[in-house]
Image (cartoon, rainbow, N blue to C red):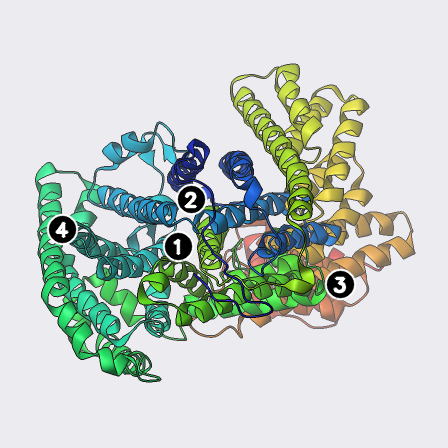
């Protein structure tokens, strides 16, 4: 399939000698297909960084490892290290190794280890597919199965959209972790925009990325195929795919779709480019024709299911799909051959493939202008029209993403070389965030990857994927039409997902990551193998070395996956027992088993420390207290940014009466939670209480330290409130962050007790409220008037009003004014 490039000419084939009839090869192929289908309905293996998402990922690791063992047996004799493609199976090992390196400075050992395991899944999948897809028959079967799985996911999503929640749940409930109470959880995602289609992903934007990739794959497959039934099948699915894409209400998908479309067109001949436009236009018109009734039916069926309305929705959808399929087939039957003939000579000219993509940019701009700036968008349902109308650079989602990227840059600046480990963004973003938003995902795969593995890991990753893209395109341009089309599906799949991942966290779904590395494996399989004489090893040395490395890795991964599955099982068992039993030993038993496997498994650390805390409260036995404190301190060594552990430890110190230690911890961790209003309120309160206590004991140094900490915390909140006023008009603040009456009262008291009555009055004045029935509000006014009196001033109107309601307040104000510290 390739020609020699360097050295002595010799014939090199990309087809491996493995017999296509090998039972093990068929086992590997079928196993991989079933694995991808299973993974799709496990919430697409979302790496949600919590206990509930762990188990499917560990099962995925175990299954991938078993498949890799089968691959090693099947392809053992084919393992060589003589071409640049062969060395990719070594290079891919560097990806998980960079995550291993980042463990040194990991913000969370727990999340970092999980990411290492996920990267191992990707590496094994890449190696397997790079070999599998060199077999023409296997390549065709897996491509067809992959598209079939995508179409199943589309159908599953539309079942939920048209109200068949229970039926859809029953179809997959027997094996899916996503089904809760008989319904696939959040297949329809509800937010401020209303219902949005999310299918198996539970997140509309990632579903949009998936749909876009398979929309283009479907069009390509239809144009490529010469079989009428294949053309009709892909043509039939165009309307459901485009309809689903619109029902996600994903602005990211709609904005990025033209970019991916233009990139793909650049690699097609002019006749194929025109056919892509024709089929998209036909399918687009067909979808728009039924969009309003199907959208309306879906919205109504979310509230109340009626079989007549559901049947009506399906009727519109099926009818439009049949018409579009027939028209697309007719185009391929009669128009496509003529286009190929007439444009053949033009296609041979240099740069001929550039003109139509350039024109498509102009066309996209015109369509965008019509949809965004004119009444043309009124042909769309209100929910979609509103989303289009809000596409601009001043909208909340754009401004918030820009903020994420700036905050990620600040995080990267502190961990520039090897990163902060897997899950770094989720662990650390609250320390670096510009405003109090809540997002455990950076909404940019590349930025998130950068903060996790630093510059070293990021350069390794980018070099790896860019090299494969470069070599694929290089080989693609040198080959015949039939050869180049055999693996182009993988280019579409990988390019589509990676481009959309610039603006979202699609790769946080392990299934999506698997598809990307499967695509990279397919692209690598299509590379022209060039001999690397300088790095060439004998076949026996290559097989021996690789087998030893792979063998050790596989054994370790298999053991780890099984042990982690056991740990997850014990953690869930403990939670279930805790809901039905009060027996200390019964709850503790599975927790001990979990922690014997994963010593700092966060959920179990917190649950066991809670048991110890309850034991101490009930018995006042210091053994419970010591065990809880030791457990949490050990946990924080591996999870230093786990807020729940810190909070639990502070609670324990308070229970024991060790207020100074509670204060020290509250102060130490304040910098990690810069927008946690409750955290700073407690810090100010503790600063006042301990400072006042030190004042009574005549400990001037301690008083000064506590009061200074309290005033610094107060100033932090003041500065934060002022900063939030500078946010762009379209950007939402996020969580509440403001000065509370308690903060103002205690900060004012601290200021007063440092003999700064004027400063105290200024602080307290900001907290005066109309409602004087509230005890805190009354105390603020009391201390404000006392501080004001101390400075020789008076707010007569407020004083008269306040004293009129309660005459004894005059004496209390006087007493405050006469205080000396």
The local crowd at label 4, few if under 14, some if 14 to 19, many if 20 or more residues have their Cα within 10 Å, is: many
Of callouts 3 and 2, the N-terminal one? 2
The residue positioned 53% from the left and 41% from the top of the image is 75
Of callouts 3 and 1, the N-terminal one? 1
Of callouts 1 and 4, the N-terminal one? 1
Relative horizontal placement of residue 295, taking residue 788 as reference (left or right): left
Q: From the image, tell me which residue sits under label 2.
A: 44
Badge 2 element: helix
The residue positioned 24% from the left and 44% from the top of the image is 155
Quarter holding the C terminus? bottom right
Q: From the image, tell me which residue sits under label 3.
A: 751
Q: From the image, tell me which residue sits under label 1.
A: 206
Badge 1 element: helix
Q: Quadrant of residue 435?
A: bottom right
- Labels 3 and 2 touching (C-beta < 8 A): no
User: Mark 3 and mark 4: span between their CA atoms?
Assistant: 70 Å
Q: Position of residue 794 (x, y in %)?
A: 66, 70
User: Mark 1 and mark 4: span between their CA atoms?
Assistant: 23 Å
Q: From the image, tell me which residue sits under label 4.
A: 317
User: Mark 1 and mark 2: span between their CA atoms?
Assistant: 10 Å
Discs 3/2, front? 2
């Amino acid at each position: 399939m390739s020609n020699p490039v360097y050295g002595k000419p010799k014939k090199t084939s990309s087809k491996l000698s493995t017999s296509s009839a090998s039972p093990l090869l068929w086992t590997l192929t079928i196993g991989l297909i079933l694995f991808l289908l299973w993974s799709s309905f496990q919430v697409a293996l979302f790496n949600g960084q919590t206990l509930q998402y762990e188990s499917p990922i560990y099962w995925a690791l175990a299954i991938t490892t078993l498949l890799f063992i089968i691959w090693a047996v099947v392809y053992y004799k084919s393992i060589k290290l003589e071409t640049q493609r062969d060395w990719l199976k070594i290079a891919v090992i560097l990806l998980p190794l960079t995550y291993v390196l980042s463990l040194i400075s990991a913000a969370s050992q727990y999340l970092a280890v999980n990411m290492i395991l996920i990267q191992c899944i990707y590496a094994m999948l890449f190696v397997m597919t790079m070999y599998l897809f060199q077999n023409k028959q296997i390549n065709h079967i897996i491509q067809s199965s992959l598209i079939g799985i995508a179409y199943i996911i589309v159908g599953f999503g539309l079942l939920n959209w048209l109200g068949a929640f229970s039926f859809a749940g029953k179809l997959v409930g027997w094996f899916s972790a996503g089904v809760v109470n008989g319904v696939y959880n959040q297949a329809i995602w509800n937010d401020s925009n209303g219902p949005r289609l999310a299918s198996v992903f539970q997140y509309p934007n990632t579903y949009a990325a998936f749909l876009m990739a398979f929309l283009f794959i479907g069009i390509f497959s239809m144009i490529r195929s010469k079989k009428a039934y294949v053309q009709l099948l892909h043509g039939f699915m165009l309307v459901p795919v485009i309809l689903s894409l619109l029902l996600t209400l994903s602005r990211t998908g709609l904005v990025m779709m033209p970019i991916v479309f233009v990139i793909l067109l650049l690699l097609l001949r002019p006749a194929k480019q025109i056919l892509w436009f024709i089929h998209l236009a036909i399918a687009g018109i067909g979808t728009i024709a039924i969009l309003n009734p199907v959208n309306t039916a879906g919205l109504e069926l979310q509230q109340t299911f009626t079989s007549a309305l559901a049947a009506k929705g399906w009727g519109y959808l099926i009818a439009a799909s049949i018409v579009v399929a027939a028209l697309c087939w007719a185009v391929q039957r009669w128009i496509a051959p003529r286009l190929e003939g007439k444009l053949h000579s033009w296609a041979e000219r240099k740069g001929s493939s550039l003109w139509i993509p350039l024109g498509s940019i102009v066309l996209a701009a015109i369509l965008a202008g019509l949809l965004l700036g004119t009444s043309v968008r009124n042909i769309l349902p209100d929910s979609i029209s509103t989303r289009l109308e809000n596409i601009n650079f001043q909208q909340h989602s754009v401004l918030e993403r820009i903020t994420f990227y700036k905050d990620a840059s600040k995080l990267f600046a502190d961990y520039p070389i090897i990163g902060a480990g897997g899950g770094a963004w989720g662990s650390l973003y609250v320390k670096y965030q510009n405003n109090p938003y809540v997002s455990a995902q950076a909404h940019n795969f590349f930025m998130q990857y950068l903060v996790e593995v630093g510059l070293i890991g990021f350069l390794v990753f980018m070099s790896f994927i860019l090299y494969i893209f470069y070599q694929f395109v290089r080989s693609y341009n040198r080959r015949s039409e039939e050869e180049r089309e055999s693996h182009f599906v993988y280019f579409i799949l990988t390019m589509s997902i990676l481009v959309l991942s610039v603006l979202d966290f699609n790769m946080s779904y392990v299934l999506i990551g698997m598809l990307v590395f499967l695509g990279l494996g397919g692209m690598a399989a299509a590379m022209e193998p060039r001999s690397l004489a300088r790095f060439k090893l004998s076949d026996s040395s290559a097989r021996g070395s690789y087998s030893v490395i792979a063998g050790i890795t596989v054994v370790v991964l298999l053991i780890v996956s099984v042990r982690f599955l056991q740990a997850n099982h014990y953690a869930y068992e403990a939670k279930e027992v805790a809901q039905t039993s009060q027996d200390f030993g019964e709850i503790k038993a599975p927790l001990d088993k979990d922690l014997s496997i994963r010593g700092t498994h966060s959920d179990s650390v917190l649950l066991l420390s809670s048991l110890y805390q309850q034991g101490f409260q009930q018995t006042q036995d210091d053994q419970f207290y010591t065990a809880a404190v030791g457990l949490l301190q050990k946990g924080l060594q591996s999870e230093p940014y786990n807020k729940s552990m810190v909070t639990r430890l502070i609670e324990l110190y308070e229970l024991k009466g060790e207020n100074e230690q509670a204060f020290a911890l509250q102060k130490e961790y304040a910098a990690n939670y810069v927008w946690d209003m409750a955290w700073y309120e407690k810090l100010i309160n503790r600063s006042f209480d301990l400072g006042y206590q030190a004042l009574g004991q005549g400990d001037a140094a301690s008083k000064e330290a506590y009061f200074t900490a309290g005033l610094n915390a107060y100033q932090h909140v003041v500065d934060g409130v002022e900063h939030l006023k500078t946010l762009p008009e379209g950007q939402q603040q996020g969580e509440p962050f403001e000065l509370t009456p308690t903060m103002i009262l205690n900060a004012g008291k601290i200021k007063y007790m440092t003999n700064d009555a004027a400063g105290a009055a200024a602080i307290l004045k900001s907290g005066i409220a109309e409602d004087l029935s509230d005890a805190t509000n009354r105390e603020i006014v009391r201390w404000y008037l006392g501080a004001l009196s101390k400075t020789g001033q008076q707010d007569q109107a407020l004083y008269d009003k306040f004293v009129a309601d309660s005459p004894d307040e005059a004496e209390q104000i006087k007493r405050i004014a006469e205080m000396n510290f």
